[in-house]
Amino acid sequence: MAGVHGLAAAGLVVLLLAAVAPAFAVDYTVGDTSGWSSGVDYVTWAKSKTFSVGDSLVFQYSMMHTVAEVSSADYSACSASNSIQSYSDQNTKIALTKPGTRYFICGTSGHCSGGMKLAVTVSAAAATTPTPTASSSPPSTATPATPSSDPGMDTPSSTPDATTTPTTTTTKSTGSTGGASGSEARSVMGLLVGAVGLAMMG
């Protein structure tokens, strides 16, 4: 019987890991509500974002426009003749799969020189691990709390020490159209911890 519980818990762990893995990916709608169109300052738009491996760019545009991924030289020259990839489906989602700079222009004549060009620098996946930071406050006494019976709840097991306040290092923007919220990710992690506990008991 213990083997069945262990197998079930292992299966649950695999499913939960699959659910948690994309929880921090962000879909960025290029140009936000303006989309991919003339008259948008894409240099400023990109500067206000931090792009990481696993994120996606979503280009939404009319049939007057296209999206062409190009080299750095073709980006500077506004040339789509040697594009790496071209799209014209009016709703293009491009996955950012590796670190580096990616270049996009509108292939319609005159649009790139009019400002329809975007360069994004993609960094390695953002860290989301809490890191302690020093505080000048005196240490406080840890007080145990009653643990919740729901493994997905945010009930702390003790009051944190004031000398080390956990902070989450994440560089994602708000306004995401994809991924799980923080509470959803914590709920999934709670279930994952519970499944591991079941597996260890069996």
Image (cartoon, rainbow, N blue to C red):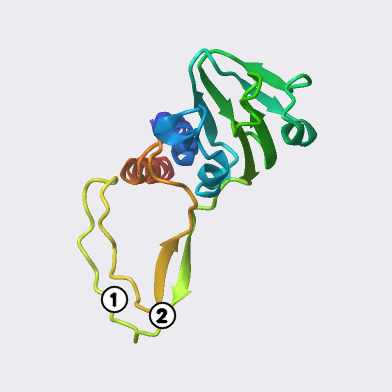
Which one is earlier in the sequence, the residue at label 1 or at label 2? 2
In this view of the protein, which residue sits in the foreground, 134 or 16? 134
Q: Position of residue 46 (x, y in %)?
A: 55, 43
Which residue is found at the position 41% from the left and 80% from the top?
135
Quadrant in which residue 150 is drawn: top left
Q: Is residue 121 visible?
A: yes
Q: Amino acid at mark 1?
A: Ala
Find disc 1 in the rendering and name its residue.
Answer: 142
Residues under labels 1 and 2: Cα distance? 16 Å
Q: Quadrant of the N terminus?
A: top left
Find disc 2 in the rendering and name its residue.
Answer: 135
In this view of the protein, which residue sits in the foreground, 170 or 154? 170
Q: Position of residue 189 (x, y in %)?
A: 39, 44
Q: Quadrant of the C terminus?
A: top left
Secondary structure of the residue carrying tag 1 is loop
Disc sitting over residue 130 in the figure = none
In this view of the protein, which residue sits in the foreground, 35 or 181? 35
Q: Is residue 12 visible?
A: no
Say above or below: 164 vs 43: below
For mark 2, does the 10 Å Cα neighbourhood hold few (<14), some (14 to 19), or many (20 or more) residues?
few
Q: How many marks?
A: 2
Q: Position of residue 119 (x, y in %)?
A: 64, 39
For mark 1, does the 10 Å Cα neighbourhood hold few (<14), some (14 to 19), or many (20 or more) residues?
few
Secondary structure of the residue carrying tag 2 is loop
Left/right placement of residue 122 relative to residue 35 reads right
Q: Position of residue 160 (x, y in %)?
A: 33, 71
Which residue is found at the position 54% from the left and 32% from the top?
56
Say above or below: 25 vs 50: above
